[in-house]
Every structure is written in C-alpha cells, then in structure tokens.
C-alpha cells in the first residue's frame, strides 16, 4: 500500500485537472438550490489547490470563506444535482503546475481531466485505480514517458469508456509491460473502452499489435500524427469491427488499404489525409466497398498521391456527406454526382488535374454546403442556372472558370465564403455579391474586372478578408472609408490595379494586412501614422505607387504588431525616421528604389528580428554601420546596392551567420574582402522550401491562421548575371548570393569563400582585386553565376572550374589572366567576349592558340579522290557526322521505299497520290500563268492608251 501522502497527492492532481476551463458557476449547472457539496470532498479539493502552483489565480474562488464554501459552484467542478457528490473535475488548460503525484480518491468521480497540466516530477497514477466510477480520463499534453506502469493502472478502471492520451510523448516501448495486464482474465478494460485518442505520439506500426488486443469494442480511434510509416495491416478491419470513427491523418502511411476495412459495417468517418497513399483511387474505393459503403458518411483522402479518374464505384457510397479528394493526382472529367450523392454536403476536389466543364456535376446536389473545385484544369462557363439548385451553399471555391450571370440575378443561397480567384467575372463588378449579407471572405482576384469599386461593397459589415487584387479596378478609395467599412476586417488586398488618389486613413481596429502595391496612389504619407497606429497592423505594402515626400516620424503610438513594411518603388525622400527603431517585431523592411538619403539611424539596431533589409537604389551614405552585424543577427537578406556608402566592410558583418543574400554593390566601399565571410553558415548549405498547400483551408472559421503566414510574405529583388533583375517571393529562401561589384575593393579574393558550398551567385566585378582566382573555386558546385571581370587578377584559370556543372553565366574579361582556358565544355561553351581583355589568355573559345597546340594533318579521301587537311577535333566530328548521315539515309530509305516494295496496296496508293499531286500542281501553274498573261495584256493595253494620250498632249503644247 502506498503511503498516505502519495495517495492524497494522486487524488489532488486528478481532481485538479478535471476542472472545466470554460464552465461558469451557476446553480443550473452544478446543483439546485439547497444541494451543497459534501464537506469531505470540499476539503479534498482545497488540499488539491494547496498543492498546485497557480500563478494566474484561476482558483481564487476556491476557499473557506463564507462566500466561497459551496464547492459545487467553483469553476471546474460539477456535482451531481441529486447527491451533491463531485462527479467532474476539469483543470485543463489553466496554466497550472503540479509538483506532486496524483492525490486521494473521490469515489464517485466520473470525469477526470488532467490535460495539459505541467507536472514537475514523474507522475505516479497508482491511486487512479481507486476511481471505480471513472468513465472519462484525459491525460493529454502530459509527458508520460517516465510514468511508472501507468497503463496497468488505467486498465484496472472497470467503467472507463474514454481515454485521451493526445501528445503524451509515448512510444511503443512504454506499452510493452502492459500486454500482461491486458491479458488478465479479470480485466474489463477491453470490454468498456469506446473512445481512444493516441494522436501526436511516437508510435510505430507495433502499436497495431496492442490495439488488436483491446480494440474489439472501440468506436472512436485517433492515431493521427504518429510515425506509423508503412501500410495498414491486412487484419485491421477484422480486429476493429466496432469502429465508427477512424483518424489516421499524417502517419506516413504508404500504398493502399486492406480489403478488410470494407468489413467495418459501422464506420462513418475515415480520415486518412496527408499521407503517402498511392495507386488508383478506384482500387482504394473498391477495398472499402464491403458493408462499409452503406455506413460511410465522411471520407477525407486529401493531400496524398492517389491517381486515376473519378471512380464510378464511389457512387455506391450513397450515405456520403463529406468527400475530400483534394491535392492528389486525379484526372479526367467529373460525372453527374446528383443521382448517387443526394446527401452530399461538402465536396472538395481542389488541386487535382480534373478537366472539362464541371457545371453539370454538382448543379443538382440540393444539400451541398461547401463546393471546392479550384485549381484544376477545368474549362468552360458556369451560369446562374448551374447554381440555382444549391440553396444550402455556404462556401464556394472556384478558379479558372467563367461565371456568367444576369445583372439582376439573386442567388438562392447566402454564402459565408466566396473564393473565385482567376475566374472570369468582369468586366463589370458582379452585382449578385450585393445580395450576400453574411460572407466574411471575398476573393475575386484576377477576375478580369475593369470597373470601379461599388459603394455598397464598403457597407458589408461582416467581411474579414477582401482580395480584389490583379484586376484593372480604377477610381479612388472613399475618404470616409474607415467610417463605413467593416471594423472586423483583417485583410485588404487591392494590389495590381489602377487605383489612384491619396491614401485614406484606414482606421480599422482589427486590420492585420493591408496591401495597396502596384497602383497609382500619389501624394504624401501624411495618413501613415493613422494607418499603422490605430490598427493591429502586421503588414503594410504600399510599394510601386507614385507616393512622394518624407516618411513621417510616428512616435505617439507603440507598433508592437508590425512585421512587414514595404515602401519600395516610390518617390519618397528624406531620412529613415527614428520610429522604425521602435518596431521590435519587424521582420521585413523594403525601401528600395526611392530617393531616401542620410545615414542609417542607430535606433534600427533594436529591430533584432529583422530578416529582410532592402535599402537599395537610394542615396544613403556613410560607413556601413557595425551594429548591423552586432545586433541584426537574424538577417537573411541584406541589400544596400546602389547607394553612396563608403569605408571598409566592418568585420562585424561576419557575425551574420544566417545571411543568404548579401548585396553591397555599386557603392564606394574600399579595403579587402573579409576572410571571415566563410562564417556565413547559411551559404554553406542548400536552402529548403517548406511545402505549403495554397488551397488548404481546413477551418475557415479560424482563417487568420491561414491568412497571416501566407497571404503576405514580401518579395526580394536581386540582380543576377550582372544586369538582370529578378523578383523572388516564397522561393527567396533558396537563394545564396554575394554581390560586391562596382566598388573600390582591393587585395586578393579570399580562398575561404570556397567553403560557401551552396553559393549560387558570386559577383566581384569592377573592383581593384589582385592575385589569382582561388584554386578551389570549383568546390562551389551550386554556382550559377560567376563574375570576376574588370579587376587586376593574374595567373591561370583554375582547372577546378571544369567542375562547375550548373554555371550558366561566367565573365572573366578585362583582367591579366594568362595560360590556357581549361578544356572543359562547361568553360569553353561561353562566349569569347567573356574572356576578352586578358592578352595572355589562349585556347577556345578565343581564336588565339596556345603554344604547343598542334594541328594534325590527315589525308582523308574526298569524293573526287583528293585529300583534305583537318585538325584532330574536326576529323573526329566529320567521322561521326558522315557515319550518322549514312546510317540515317539507310534507315530512311528502307522505311519508305521498303514499305512500297513489300506492300502492294501502299505502292498503288503512293503512285496514285503522286499522279494527283502532279495534276494539282499542273492545274495551279496553268491557272496562275493564265492570270499573269491576262494582267500583262491589260497592262499592255493601258500602256498603249497612255502613250496615245501623251502624244496628243505634246502636240497641243507650243514650243
């Protein structure tokens, strides 16, 4: 028997963690008037409170004072309305810390929630076995990897129906000792357990052996986010016959599913999205086509690698309400779904390669609430007739289709979400949207609209996201926009349009992202402080407009949320205001291509989270601040090109280990290239582009989690190959660039640069560098562009450059290089102009031959018996050329002529064709000659007539 202290602590924890987070104290919830909690249980709860670390005072209402004595009214406690006994304790998600073990038994406790409690020691759950009435146990969010025989304790609970172990750091090894417990003859665990959540742990396929021993009565099983990494066992369906809900999302499953899963006659929900399932979808559906086809209501297979066309055998699943096949590799046209799926409420096919016109496929699905078929290869027109039989529709996702409606059309539905990206809706703004009063999301970007924004749009109060970008919308934004538009709006994107006028003060308290780039807004930034000061703005993009004047210094408000500022490509002047240094969460600052001047304000060193700093093409001057390398340690992209910076490159820059793009070109920088640039560790490893599925919107109700990370990430402008400008969006993470060109740098090229193995562009041109090209330059195998032109480099071109297999731009011109150009295709394939100005350089592609090069004279018979003189390379080329020509002639001759010799019918058809062609050519030539002769005769008659007239006129004119 455990000691008294341990037993008390066990009960305390159990009681503590079951307090409902959101439950309010009221008599109707916890007991009727006159029913009081049992005193012994109240004292037990207070002991639990004493053992907790409650830093936030969540349990302040628990106490001995007169107004706090009724424990059934305490938050997190539910009592039986008849007996007053505590039957539910929920303390989850209250940021509590528990320093001891679980406490004393409360005999009638039925629901015990310990989810996300922070235990400070290993958990001893022995006293759980005393809770004989317990039906619901939640240990989610706790680390059970060091708990002692906890599962054997849980198995002793005879009435347990629900066991939630989500995110408990459990591995298969933690279950090993429990097999003997499960086999106890007296154990009723497997008979009572109905709901089991093992998601977000570290189970391998061995978990199936354990499940098959206890799972004969389980109706709800969640294995999602475990590294199962394999296929589902063949016997799975026969061992889990009671299942109604199965979640195997994100488990690394491969292949298909066993036929036995078609035997689970009660299965209603099957969730297997985000795996590596492969094969034909029709085969997958076929394996489910046992009695499961009569019960299945929800089938989620999105984000796999299933192929084939839309299967006809899926029409047997007449009970389906939700079907999600998004982000697979499905092709072909869609059949008419209405006859088979009369109960279908959600259809998600986004991100496949379906083709044809889908209009007739869904037009009669009377109960459809969500239609998502965007990002396919559909073509055609959808009319109002195709949407008129969908009265329940709430979520509409279409793309790349034409939506044609009459100007007075009133849809039978009220949409909550409208996403018609890249659909043809224009040129007029669709008026039917005005009839939708409940939508919070409107995306009609790239829709061919050439109209002005109607005034009624600003009166749509529920809207939270508005995207009208990539159209040709003109006009001005109303000056009082902030007084009429929805204060709940979080995202506004009006970029890539023809809007003009001044920036209105958008005082929308919940606005998070505002993108007005690539329009024709003009005037000053006088409203800037209002825009960013009175909102929760995190991203503001007003680039590529006609804005002018200085950036105001907005000091009166704290801007804790601002993470992205883009004012690039305007006519802004003056200095960077010091308030920028107060933006402690700033990640992206782009001011390139303006007329800004002055020195960089020292306050900017407070922007320690900055990832992108682009100040290129301005008039900044002074030394490059050393605080950039000391304080901005998160920098990945530093672009200071085309300014007036001078002095040496500070050694502190070498501390920017995360740097991916360093562009200091076109300044007046002197000194040497620091050897410590080799510390740029991000340039020594390839970049990874995190997968993002642009069309997954799992929960449109919480769309903020979808919008904010992906809706605006900011772009980076870089100059590659010396002259070409590229704009990089999300794939900017793959870049690795150093550009120090057009400065006054001296000294040698540091050999340490050869350690930057992932470097893609190295431009040191137009400096005064001396010495040789580093012999290990060939180690930079990812190099795409190398420009060392217009320096004073000497010596030979390193032979290791032959290893630069991806090099597509090379310029070594106007140096003092000597010797032979390496005889490698990768180097000699470039233009001779890229080696000019090196008088001692020889070899291809230059015409100047190197000393010792020999011309090999060979006699080669010609057609007339003479001899020709060729070099060794030319002789080799000619030999293969004539050999290939001979083989080609022989093959072509026998393919054409041999078939005519061997096939009599082909021979007759061929000569008949020749005769017809000859006759056709003869007729065409004869007809053309006839027309020409006719025109010549007319011209001759006209010439004769003009001659007679001119003769007569000459006779009338006196000399």
Image: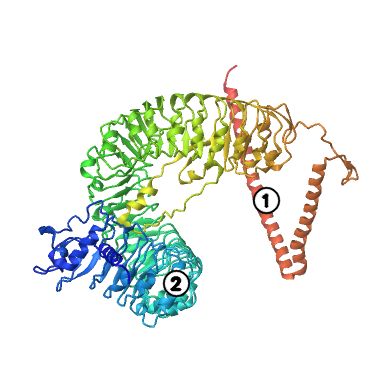
Q: Residue furthest right?
A: 865
Q: Position of residue 881 (x, y in %)?
A: 78, 49
Looking at the image, residue 160 lies above or below residue 51: below
129 versus 626 height, above or below: below
Q: Is residue 11 left or right of residue 377?
A: left
Q: Nearer the viewer, residue 679 or 714?
A: 679
Mark 2 residue crowding within 10 angstroms, few (<14) / some (14–19) / many (20+): few
The mark found on residue 872 in the picture is: none
* Real-space CA distance between mark 2 and mark 1, rounded to the nearest whole angstrom: 98 Å
Q: Which of the two discs, 2 and 1, labels the residue nearer the N terminus?
A: 2
For the C terminus, give its image quadrant: top right
* Depth check, front residue: 833 or 564: 564
Snapshot quadrant of residue 78: bottom left
The x and y percentages for residue 607 are 38, 36
Residue 877 as seen in the image, left or right of residue 639? right
Identified at 14% across, 68% down, the residue is 31
Q: Which residue is mark 2?
A: 177
The residue that disc 1 covers is 925
Residue 210 lies in what quarter of the image?
bottom left
Q: Is residue 172 visible?
A: no
Query: Element under label 1?
Result: helix
Q: Position of residue 112 (x, y in %)?
A: 27, 67
Front one among 61 and 912: 61
């Amino acid at each position: 028997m455990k000691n008294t202290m341990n037993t008390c602590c066990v009960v305390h924890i159990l009681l503590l963690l079951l307090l409902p987070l959101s439950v309010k104290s009221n008599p109707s919830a916890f007991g009727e008037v006159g029913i009081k909690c049992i005193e012994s249980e109240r004292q037990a709860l207070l002991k639990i409170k004493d053992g907790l670390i409650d830093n936030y005072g969540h349990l302040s209402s628990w106490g001995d004072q007169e107004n706090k004595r009724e424990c059934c009214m305490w938050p997190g406690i539910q009592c039986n309305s008849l007996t007053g006994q505590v039957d539910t304790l929920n303390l989850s998600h209250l940021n509590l810390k528990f320093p001891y073990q679980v406490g004393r038994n409360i005999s009638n406790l039925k629901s015990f929630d310990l989810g996300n409690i922070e235990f400070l020691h290993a958990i001893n759950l022995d006293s759980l076995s005393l809770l004989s009435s317990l039906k619901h146990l939640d240990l989610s969010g706790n680390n059970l990897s060091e708990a002692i025989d906890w599962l054997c304790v849980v198995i002793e609970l005879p009435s347990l129906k629900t066991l939630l172990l989500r995110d408990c750091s459990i591995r298969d090894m933690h279950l090993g000792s429990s097999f003997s417990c499960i086999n106890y003859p007296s154990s009723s665990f497997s008979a009572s357990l109905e709901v089991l959540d093992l998601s977000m742990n570290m189970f391998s396929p061995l978990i199936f052996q354990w499940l098959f021993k206890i799972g004969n009565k389980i109706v709800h099983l969640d294995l999602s986010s475990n590294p199962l990494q394999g296929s589902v066992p063949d016997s799975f369906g026969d061992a889990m016959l009671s299942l109604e809900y199965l979640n195997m999302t994100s488990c690394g499953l491969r292949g298909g599913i066993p036929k036995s899963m078609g035997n689970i006659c009660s299965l209603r929900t099957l969730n297997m999205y985000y795996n590596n399932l492969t094969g034909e979808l029709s085969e997958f559906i076929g394996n489910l086509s046992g009695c499961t086809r009569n019960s299945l209501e929800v089938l989620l297979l999105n984000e796999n690698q299933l192929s084939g066309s839309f299967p006809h055998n899926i029409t047997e699943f007449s009970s389906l309400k939700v079907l999600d096949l998004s982000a697979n590799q499905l092709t072909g046209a869609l059949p008419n779904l209405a006859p088979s799926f009369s109960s279908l409420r959600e259809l998600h096919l986004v991100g496949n390669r379906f083709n044809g016109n889908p209009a007739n496929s869904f037009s009669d699905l009377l109960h459809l609430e969500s239609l998502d078929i965007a990002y396919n290869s559909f073509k055609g027109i959808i009319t109002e007739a195709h949407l008129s039989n969908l009265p329940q529709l709430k979520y509409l996702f279409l793309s790349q289709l034409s939506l044609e409606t009459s100007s007075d059309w009133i849809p039978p539905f009220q949409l909550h979400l409208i996403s018609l990206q890249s659909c043809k809706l224009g040129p007029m703004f669709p008026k039917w949207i005005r009839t939708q009063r409940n939508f919070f999301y409107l995306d009609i970007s790239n829709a061919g609209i050439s109209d002005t924004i109607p005034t009624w749009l600003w009166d749509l109060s529920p809207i939270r996201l508005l995207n009208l970008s990539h159209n040709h919308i003109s006009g001005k934004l109303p000056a009082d926009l902030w007084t009429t538009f929805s204060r709940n709006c979080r995202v506004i994107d009006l970029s890539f349009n023809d809007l003009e006028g001044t920036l209105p003060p958008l005082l929308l308290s919940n606005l998070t992202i505002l993108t007005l780039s690539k329009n024709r807004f003009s005037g000053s930034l006088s409203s800037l402080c209002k825009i960013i000061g009175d909102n929760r703005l995190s991203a503001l993009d007003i680039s590529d407009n006609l804005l002018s004047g200085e950036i105001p210094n907005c000091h009166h408000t704290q801007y804790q949320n601002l993470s992205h500022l883009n004012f690039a490509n305007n006519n802004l002047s003056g200095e960077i205001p010091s308030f920028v240094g107060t933006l402690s969460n700033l990640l992206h600052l782009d001011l390139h291509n303006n007329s800004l001047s002055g020195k960089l304000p020292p306050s900017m060193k407070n922007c320690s989270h900055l990832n992108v700093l682009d100040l290129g093409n301005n008039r900044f001057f002074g030394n490059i601040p050393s605080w950039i390398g000391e304080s901005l340690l998160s920098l990945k992209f530093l672009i200071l090109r085309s300014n007036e910076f001078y002095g040496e490159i500070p050694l502190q820059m070498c501390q920017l280990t995360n740097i991916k793009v360093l562009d200091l070109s076109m300044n007046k920088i002197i000194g040497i290239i620091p050897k410590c640039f080799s510390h740029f560790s991000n340039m020594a490893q390839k970049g990874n582009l995190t997968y993002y599925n642009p069309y997954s919107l799992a929960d449109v109700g919480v769309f903020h989690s979808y919008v904010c990370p992906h809706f605006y990430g900011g772009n980076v402008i870089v100059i590659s190959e010396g002259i070409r400008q590229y704009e990089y969006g999300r794939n900017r993470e793959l870049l690795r660039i150093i550009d120090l060109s057009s400065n006054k740098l001296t000294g040698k090229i540091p050999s340490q640069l050869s350690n930057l193995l992932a470097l893609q562009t190295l431009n040191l041109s137009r400096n005064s560098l001396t010495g040789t090209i580093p012999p290990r330059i060939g180690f930079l195998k990812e190099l795409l562009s190398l420009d060392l032109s217009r320096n004073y480099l000497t010596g030979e071109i390193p032979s290791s450059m032959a290893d630069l297999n991806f090099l597509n731009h090379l310029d070594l011109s106007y140096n003092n290089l000597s010797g032979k150009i390496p005889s490698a295709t990768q180097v000699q394939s470039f233009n001779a102009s890229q080696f000019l100005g090196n008088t001692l350089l020889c070899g291809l592609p230059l015409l100047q031959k190197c000393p010792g090069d020999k011309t090999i004279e060979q006699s080669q018979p010609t057609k007339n018996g003479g001899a020709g003189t060729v070099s060794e390379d030319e002789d080799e080329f000619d030999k293969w050329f004539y050999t290939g020509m001979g083989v080609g002639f022989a093959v072509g001759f026998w393919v054409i002529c041999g078939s005519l010799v061997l096939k009599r019918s082909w021979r007759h058809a061929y000569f008949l064709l020749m005769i017809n062609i000859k006759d056709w050519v003869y007729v065409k030539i004869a007809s053309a000659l006839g027309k020409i002769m006719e025109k010549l005769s007319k011209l001759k008659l006209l010439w004769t007539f003009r001659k007679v007239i001119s003769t007569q006129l000459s006779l009338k004119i006196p000399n």
